[in-house]
Amino acid sequence: MALNFILLFFTALFAGLLVFVAPVFKEKYFKLLLVFAGSYLFSITILHIIPELFAGNYNPGRMGFYILLGFLLQQVLEFWSAGIEHGHIHKHQAASYKGVFTLMIGLFIHAFLEGTLLTHNVSALHTHSDKTILLGILMHKGPAAFALAAVLSASLSKKWTLVLLTLFALASPLGMISSNFFINQGLLSTEGIGILYGLVTGGFLHISTTIFFESSPHHKFQLNKLAVTFLAAALAMASEYFI
């Protein structure tokens, strides 16, 4: 768990710090990175998370409800976060302090919840190594942290940007530690674990599909994006079945 904490925290922190050392970035390459991360996240959700949730000790009907609820919850969170979870960068729009506050609430809740997927317990989700899920979260957190730092640096001082970036970087590790604590203390039931996992799974579906739709807003065929999508899906299949 300590290694997961380090990887989650420093991946987000270092990705966000890139804004200060490389403030000018090629939007085309950033979008390709997002497409790769979105494709991998979608693939592991379909190949790994959803099958094991429905094959586990959870009520299938309720699990479907929790996943749908997570999908809808992510839509609500994005009203606060302005879509930073899937790489929206609006540096030209300086956010108000109230806007920064709601943005951080939306992002923190999302990142906290996704950290719960890395909880080590006897549930069905971890009959397989969690490396596949960890890699998906890391791929997702990097671009999100970069987008967050880009938006914050347009509105706040470097000091406050670093403070809020650090807070965001801590969200997923805190989610992982908190859920582990509640489970070990017997304060989180099997049903409660299923609710958490279902909510996060729905959120993953929303984020990954949104990345796909927004990467080609005019529905134009782009070979490079198609190639990146298939490459990420192939990596997900390899990590699930062969690694």
Image (spheres, rainbow, N blue to C red):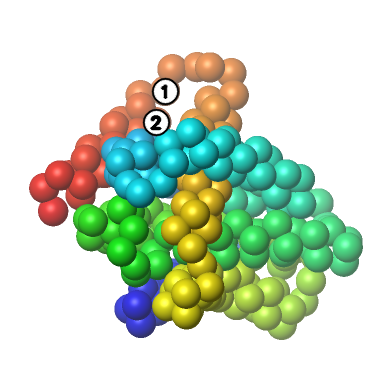
Identify which residue, 184 or 7, lies in the foreground. Answer: 184
On-image quarter of the N terminus: bottom left
Question: Which amino acid type is shown beneath numbered disc 1?
Answer: Gln
| Corner quadrant of residue 210 | top right
Q: Mark 1 falls on what kind of element?
A: loop
| Lateral position of residue 32 relative to residue 195, left or right | left
The outermost residue toward the left is: 242
Residue at image location 31% in from the left, 64% down from the top: 122
Residue 148: percent from left, percent from top? 64, 60
| Corner quadrant of residue 232 | top left
Q: CA distance from mark 2 to mark 1?
A: 6 Å
Residue 196 in sight in this render: yes
Q: Which mark is residue 191?
A: none
Return the residue at label 1. Answer: 222
Residue at image location 49% in from the left, 63% down from the top: 189
Badge 2 vs badge 1, beta-carbon distance below 8 Å? yes
Residue 155: percent from left, percent from top? 80, 65
Residue 15 in sight in this render: no
Q: Taking 111 as reference, is 194 above or below it?
A: above
Q: Mark 2 falls on what kind of element?
A: helix
| Corner quadrant of residue 48 | top left
Q: Which mark is residue 225?
A: 2
Residue at image location 40% in from the left, 67% down from the top: 119
Question: Which amino acid type is shown beneath numbered disc 2?
Answer: Lys
Residue at image location 15% in from the left, 44% down from the top: 241
